[in-house]
């Protein structure tokens, strides 16, 4: 029988707290730590390896093998961790709206956590700058995670729309989701589309990202970038496979990975 080892998971994300009460303080700690420990990556998709969204497979990949994944994987496992710690969690399909000219299909997995003071959106599966903390789902209240400001609007069709304003930037729609609860099986079809569709952005080039204390490390299939508060501090084009492998380990904590 599968053993969901909470302590091993918390060690994976660098959380050493012994407090296990399911409150907002602990949720904040776990959420921030997760983003800076588990990289966003699509390498299995690029290599043509079918994704397994079962909790057992995700635990083995992310916790035991110290890999990452994309939203359907990372948020799926994160939701299982929160439930195992007695949080009240539901899952929802979202539309990723950033820089989209038209309304896109639902192909993003987000979590809603119900606490005593209301519901919070939790999402540790985005490869760009995104909320590093759980955000309370309430209209027109600006919330700041230290890197950007966020606010929710409730629109008739899109549902809860999350707006983002980066430092010295303008307000942009990040993603939206409705209150309709999804089951684990509901994520299989959109994930398969992301894996296999010719129109998918996920099966074209390797994508890697990891939040840091000062910004974001990323890789777009050509260049590695180290950013601080939105400013690119290092832009590296690897000269060979050895340097590429070294940078993947250094910037994303992924060892023995060959693209």
Image (cartoon, rainbow, N blue to C red):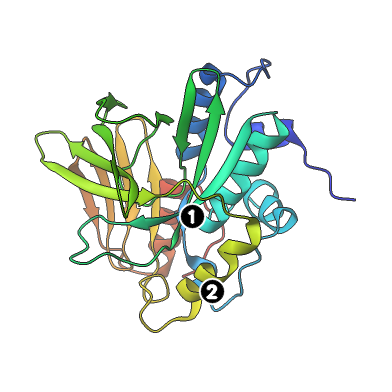
The x and y percentages for residue 47 are 53, 76
202 vs 231, nearest the viewer: 202
Q: Quadrant of residue 82?
A: top right
175 vs 204, nearest the viewer: 175
- Which mark, residue 224? none
The x and y percentages for residue 134 are 44, 30
Q: Mark 2 highlights which residue?
A: 192
Few, some or many C-alpha atoms within 10 Å of disc 1 (few <14, some 14-19, many ≥20)? many
Q: Mark 1 highlights which residue?
A: 71
- Residue drawn at x 60%, y 37% as measured from the top left: 89
Whichever of labels 1 and 2 marks the residue nearer the N terminus, that label is 1
Left or right of residue 198: residue 27 = right
> Height in image: 220 above or below 36?
below
Secondary structure at numbered mark 2 = helix
Secondary structure at numbered mark 1 = helix
Q: In which quarter of the image is residue 133?
A: top left
- Residue drawn at x 43%, y 63% as measured from the top left: 107
The x and y percentages for residue 181 are 56, 49
Camera sees residue 46: no
């Amino acid at each position: 029988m599968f053993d969901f080892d909470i302590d091993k998971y918390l060690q994976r994300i660098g959380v050493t707290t012994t407090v296990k009460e399911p409150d907002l303080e602990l949720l904040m700690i776990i959420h921030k730590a997760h983003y800076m420990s588990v990289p966003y990556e699509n390498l299995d998709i690029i290599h043509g390896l079918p994704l397994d969204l079962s909790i057992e497979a995700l635990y083995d990949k992310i916790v035991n093998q110290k890999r990452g994944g994309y939203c359907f994987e990372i948020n799926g496992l994160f939701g299982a961790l929160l439930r195992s710690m007695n949080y009240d969690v539901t899952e929802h399909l979202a539309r990723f709206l950033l820089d989209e000219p038209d309304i896109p299909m639902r192909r993003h997995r987000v979590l809603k956590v119900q606490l005593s003071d209301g519901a919070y959106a939790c999402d540790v599966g985005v490869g760009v700058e995104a909320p590093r903390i759980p955000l309370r789902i309430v209209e027109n209240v600006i919330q700041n995670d230290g890197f950007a400001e966020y606010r929710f609007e409730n629109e008739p069709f899109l549902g809860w729309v999350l707006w983002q304003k980066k430092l010295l930037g303008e307000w942009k729609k990040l993603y939206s989701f409705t209150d309709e609860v999804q089951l684990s099986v509901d994520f299989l079809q959109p994930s398969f589309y992301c894996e296999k569709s010719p129109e998918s952005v996920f099966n074209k080039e390797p994508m890697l990202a990891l939040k840091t204390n000062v910004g974001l490390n990323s890789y777009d299939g050509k260049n590695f970038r180290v950013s601080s508060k939105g400013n690119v501090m290092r832009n590296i084009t690897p000269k060979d496979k050895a340097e590429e492998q070294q940078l993947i380990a250094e910037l994303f904590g992924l060892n023995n990975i060959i693209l």
